[in-house]
């Protein structure tokens, strides 16, 4: 935002205008958050044409979302695999014979 400092009275405005070495009284003030553009491609034409610049480090938000979903899917696959191993272990587990099992009967 560009702010112009205006004197409160006409007399002060006249003296400020006549005084040598005075500035014009404008200030640049930042309002709101900064807005940063990350260029992906720059074309020769308005919306197409030869590519003059391409940002190779750019990753689209859709690719980031897809990677996150893949990671969540891997966690699910790991959980299902662990459940299957548990079931197999439980089915194959044999309780050993207790040699003192019939002592107190």
Image: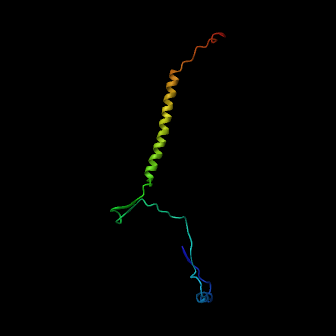
- Indicate the quadrant containing the N terminus: top left, top right, bottom left or bottom right: bottom right
Quadrant in which residue 51 is drawn = bottom left
Q: Relative to the observer, which residue lies in front, 98 or 28?
A: 28
Measured along the vertical axis of the image, is residue 44 above or below residue 88? Answer: below
Tell me if residue 54 comes above or below residue 23 in the rendering: above
Does residue 30 appear to the left or right of 61 in the view shown?
right
Q: Position of residue 100 (x, y in %)?
A: 64, 11
Identify the residue at image location x=59%, y=90%.
18
Q: Position of residue 29 (x, y in %)?
A: 57, 72
Residue 86's place in the image compared with 55, above or below, is above
The total of numbered circles placed on residues is 0
Q: Percent x, y for residue 82?
A: 51, 31
> Residue at horizontal 53%, vertical 21%?
93
Q: Considering the image in quadrants, where does the C terminus appear?
A: top right
Q: Residue at x 65, y 9 (%)?
A: 103
- Residue 88 screen position, x and y as percent: 49, 25
- Would residue 37 be found to the left or right of residue 46 on screen? right
**Which residue ends up furthest to the left in the rendered image?**
49
Color style of the picture: rainbow
Examine the image and state in which quarter residue 49 appears: bottom left
- Taking 32 as reference, is 63 left or right? left
54 over 18 or under it: above or below: above
- The front one of 79 and 53 is 53
């Amino acid at each position: 935002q560009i702010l112009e400092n205006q004197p409160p009275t006409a007399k002060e405005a006249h003296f400020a205008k006549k005084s040598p070495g005075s500035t014009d009284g404008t200030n640049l003030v930042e309002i709101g958050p900064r807005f940063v553009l990350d260029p992906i491609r720059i074309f020769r034409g308005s919306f197409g044409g030869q590519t003059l610049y391409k940002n190779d480090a750019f990753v689209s938000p859709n690719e980031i979302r897809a990677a996150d979903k893949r990671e969540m899917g891997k966690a699910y696959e790991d959980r299902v695999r662990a459940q299957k191993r548990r079931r197999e272990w439980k089915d194959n587990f044999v309780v050993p014979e207790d040699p003192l099992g019939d002592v107190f009967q």
